[in-house]
Image (cartoon, rainbow, N blue to C red):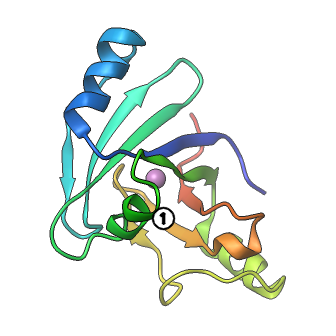
Amino acid sequence: MIGRLNHIAIAVPDLDRAIAQYRDTLGAKVNPPQDEPDHGVTVVFIDLPNTKIELLYPLGDNSPIAGFLERNPAGGIHHMCYEVDDILAARDRLTAAGARVLGDGTPKTGAHGNPVLFLHPKDFNGCLIELEQVPAAS
Ligand code: CO
């Protein structure tokens, strides 16, 4: 059911430093920061040949990653995102198997403008998983 690894998200305590590190030290293609007020984060996508890295930095007062950075002050891997071609079918299959979807189960619009859902890390080996519905490649 799941398809490609769309991205790995890393929560960072210093966004400018992380951008400079990926751009200058690691030599990657770093895209401009995007504020995502609905998600409480500023996001920076980094294009790798086979996937993307998503740097996450808190935005606003109730950022969902503020607590994560308190527990992980140096930053850390926050989630990974797998592509699916039908997010509602994926949700129904996973909830029927006992997995918990975060929130009310309704997909939100993610940073790429596609529908996304998050799955409870306790149901997936301690790993927060994002599912993103990506239109089939043409
Ligand atoms: Co993500």
Q: Closest to the observer: 13 or 31?
A: 13
To which residue does mark 1 refer? Answer: 116
- Looking at the image, residue 110 lies above or below residue 21: below
- Looking at the image, residue 115 lies above or below residue 95: above
- Furthest toward the right, the residue is 97
**Percent coordinates x, y for residue 13 in the rendering:** 30, 46
Which image quarter: residue 19? top left
Which image quarter: residue 60? bottom left
Q: Under 8 Å from ligand 1: the CB of mark 1? A: yes
Q: Residue at x 19, y 61 (%)?
A: 59
**Percent coordinates x, y for residue 77 in the rendering:** 54, 47
**Percent coordinates x, y for residue 12 in the rendering:** 35, 45
Q: Residue at x 31, y 16 (%)?
A: 23
- Looking at the image, residue 86 lies above or below residue 50: below
Q: Amino acid at mark 1?
A: Val
Q: Residues within 10 Å of mark 1 (few under 14, many from 20)?
A: many
- Looking at the image, residue 80 lies above or below residue 52: below
Q: Is residue 13 visible?
A: yes
